[in-house]
Image (cartoon, rainbow, N blue to C red):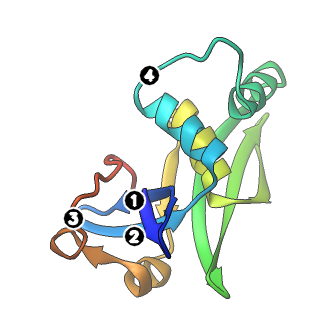
Amino acid sequence: MINIFGKAVPALMLEDEDGLLMPIHIGQSEALSINSVMKNETMPRPMTHDLIVSILERLGAKVDRVLIDEKVDNIYYARITLKVDGVSMEFDARPSDCIAIALRNDAVIMINEDVFNDDSISKENFQGSKAITGIV
């Protein structure tokens, strides 16, 4: 959580191999979904991202990768790439949704280098937070 004007706002901390962090502010439900998959917890009922993953599996689609590729007016944009029968399909989606789905599929999560470099900070400059590691 990050405090903005006295309010706690969930933030996803993406980390590169050099230990630089890039925060992305996300909604409460997406934070809960990502947190549950990171802790390997199963909810009593499927969450939206679990439902999406189940549908994709039954349709024979595989999550290939996620790319956070743009930031416009302080809003990050991402694309999720699915493969079905050797055909790739790309969909525009919120980064938090892409990440929640990718983590459930062990899919690669990538960030455009320019986007990351523009918004990344060192761990020393962001004390008191924990980063989700293992994200490319």
Q: Which mark is residue 19?
A: 3
**Residue shown at the point (60%, 17%) measured from the top left:** 43
Q: How much space separates mark 1 and mark 4, taking CA atoms? A: 18 Å
Of the image marks 4 and 3, the number of the one nearer the N terminus: 3
Of the image marks 1 and 4, the number of the one nearer the N terminus: 1
Q: Please identify the quadrant where the N terminus is shown.
A: bottom left
Q: x and y percent of residue 25 in the render? A: 54, 64
Which of the 4 image quarters holds residue 20? Answer: bottom left
- Identify the element where label 2 is drawn: strand
Of the image marks 2 and 4, the number of the one nearer the N terminus: 2
| Residue where numbered disc 1 is placed | 13
Q: x and y percent of residue 73 in the render? A: 67, 88
**Residue shown at the point (40%, 59%) measured from the top left:** 13
**Residue shown at the point (40%, 60%) measured from the top left:** 14
Task: Residue type at mark 4: give it.
Answer: Asn
Q: Please identify the quadrant where the C terminus is shown.
A: bottom left
| Residue where numbered disc 2 is placed | 22
Of the image marks 2 and 1, the number of the one nearer the N terminus: 1
Task: Residue type at mark 1: give it.
Answer: Met
Q: How much space separates mark 3 and mark 2, taking CA atoms? A: 10 Å
- Identify the element where label 4 is drawn: loop
Residue 102 seen in this snapshot: no
| Residue where numbered disc 4 is placed | 40
